Image (spheres, helix red, strand yellow):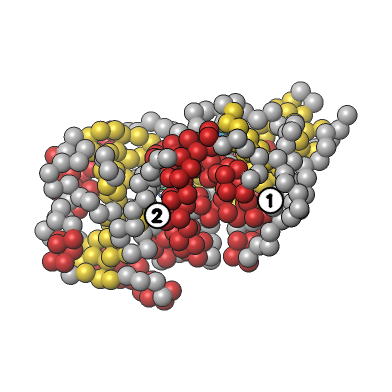
């Protein structure tokens, strides 16, 4: 017998939703659906939940630094990132209530730093991009920056304060999301791959009306059983092939006397202090999908971070690791319904998956429940991939 088709979204219908992938994206969508909107969800993940890229990240919420002056990216990525940043204060309060646990959200502004002419030019380019968008920022002379963050090296040339760019503790967030969902009568967490099936090319998952593919960099490879064969989800929508892997290595050191308290950015290096550790990152390695850090890359990161804050060189290393970002060519996520009605995707968030988790959750929930979509949100649909090709 043919399975029933996945259901179309409709405003008066409460669907049963299956979410494939328990990273911050899948968990945030489950939180939005089950806890905020009363929609039953099942979350499937064969690996330990929340331990993918979402565990590896630095937790910066950085629309200005990550998206304002980036070239060759999705034309509305900055707008989505700003909307995402604006949702975080309320999202962290809702999460704290539901989980009885903190997310480490902080609105303390980040600083972009410059120590030479090239870095100063990059900083001014970012300031001009923010000016053009009407986004608040302030260039600080070195003396003022040193008062704000005494750990900065004495040869600082200039700093740019970015009030839009805060941070969370991403590990605390995924732990809290899992706790909140475990408490919800509408959420079921299953430590296994979903038994997705296809009969005659038609996808189904027993007991569910809608499916969200949110398996980070391996979303296209989610397995589907058809006539005893194991196929991949990409066969149902080639746009999923767009999601590629971008390795990233990082380390954390212990806090010590005079260690930094502000999120600091300079070129590709950043320092993100959390309550219990100081994170230093990160490499960006296209096509690399390993979770094993390399000692040489870690030493180079530490040396470059110590150029910004010399105290870091003397603090004990707590942990080194590598994570795998899901990325796309336009550096923007695929969010929306796929070529298969009833099958949605939320993946490819690249360097902004923590920042974009609450807004992604809201967009997917709105779509699944048949709410009207803004043009901005529609522009992240996976159908844009085919259109570009
Ligand atoms: C080094 C590094 C630093 C970063 N720093 C930041 C930052 O500061 N700020 C920011 O906003 N973003 C940052 N990011 C990016 C961010 O971490 C990612 O964009 C985000 O975590 C992606 O979330 P995800 O849920 O899509 O993927 P993941 O967290 O990787 O989760 C995917 C989940 O899917 C599961 N899965 C895999 N296959 C299947 C399957 N077949 N069925 C079901 N489940 C499956 C996996 O086990 C995993 O749990 C960073 C990333 C890295 C690597």
Residue at 72% over, 44% down: 15
Percent across and percent down for residue 171 are 39, 39
Relative to 140, 338 lies left or right: right
* Mark before the other along the chain sequence, 2 or 1: 2
Q: Residues within 10 Å of mark 2 (few under 14, many from 20)?
A: many
Labels 2 and 1 touching (C-beta < 8 A): no
Mark 2 vs ligand 1: CB below 8 Å: yes
Quarter of the image where one finds residue 201 = top right
Residue nearest the viewer, comparing 91 with 278: 91
Quarter of the image where one finds residue 320 = top left
Q: Is there any visible trace of residue 12 in the rendered image?
A: yes
Identify the secondary structure beneath mark 2.
Answer: strand
Identify the secondary structure beneath mark 1.
Answer: helix
Percent across and percent down for residue 47 are 52, 28
Relative to 82, 8 lies left or right: right
State the quadrant of the C terminus: bottom right
Q: Which residue is mark 1?
A: 368
Q: Which residue is mark 2?
A: 61
Q: Is there any visible trace of residue 328 in the rendered image?
A: no
Can you say whether 48 is above or below 246 in the image? above
Percent across and percent down for residue 40 are 66, 40
Q: Residue furthest right?
A: 1
Task: Report the mark closest to the observer, 2 or 1.
Answer: 1
Residue at 53% over, 41% down: 27
The span from disc 2 to disc 1 (Cα, nearest Å) is 26 Å
Quarter of the image where one finds residue 44 = top right
Residue at 63% over, 65% down: 374
Can you say whether 133 is above or below 219 in the image? below
Q: Which mark is residue 221?
A: none
State the quadrant of the N terminus: top right
Percent across and percent down for residue 75 are 53, 66
């Amino acid at each position: 017998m043919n399975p029933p088709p996945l259901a179309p979204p409709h405003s008066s219908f409460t669907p049963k939703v299956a979410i494939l992938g328990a990273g911050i994206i899948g968990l945030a969508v489950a939180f939005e659906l089950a806890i905020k909107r009363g929609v039953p969800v099942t979350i499937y993940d064969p690996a330990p939940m929340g331990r993918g890229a979402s565990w590896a990240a630095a937790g910066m919420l950085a629309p200005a630094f990550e998206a304002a002056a980036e070239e060759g990216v999705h034309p509305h990525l900055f707008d989505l990132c700003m909307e995402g940043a604006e949702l975080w204060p309320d999202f962290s309060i809702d999460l704290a209530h539901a989980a009885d646990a903190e997310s480490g959200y902080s609105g303390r502004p980040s600083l972009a730093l410059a120590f030479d002419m090239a870095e100063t030019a990059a900083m001014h380019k970012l300031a001009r991009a923010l000016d053009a968008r009407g986004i608040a920022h302030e260039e600080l002379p070195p003396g003022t920056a040193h008062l704000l963050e005494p750990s900065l090296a004495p040869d600082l040339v200039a700093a740019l304060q970015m009030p839009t760019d805060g941070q969370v503790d991403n590990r605390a967030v995924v732990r809290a999301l899992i706790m909140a969902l475990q408490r919800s009568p509408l959420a079921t967490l299953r430590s296994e791959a979903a038994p997705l099936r296809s009969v005659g090319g038609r996808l189904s998952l027993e007991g569910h009306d809608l499916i969200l593919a949110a398996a980070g960099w391996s979303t296209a490879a989610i397995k589907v059983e058809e006539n005893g064969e194991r196929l991949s989800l990409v066969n149902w929508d080639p746009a999923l092939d767009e999601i590629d892997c971008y390795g990233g290595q990082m380390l954390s050191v212990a806090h010590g006397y005079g260690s930094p308290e502000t999120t600091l950015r300079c070129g590709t290096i950043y320092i993100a202090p959390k309550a219990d550790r100081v994170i230093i990152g990160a490499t960006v390695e296209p096509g690399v999908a390993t979770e094993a850090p390399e000692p040489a890359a870690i030493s180079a990161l530490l040396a470059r971070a110590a150029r910004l804050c010399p105290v870091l060189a003397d603090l004990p290393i707590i942990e080194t690791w590598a994570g795998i970002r899901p990325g796309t060519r336009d550096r923007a996520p695929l969010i929306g319904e796929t070529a298969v009605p009833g099958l949605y995707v939320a993946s490819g968030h690249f360097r902004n998956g923590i920042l974009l988790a609450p807004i992604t959750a809201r967009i997917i929930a709105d779509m699944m429940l048949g709410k009207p979509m803004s043009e901005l949100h529609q522009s992240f649909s996976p159908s844009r991939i085919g259109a570009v090709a």
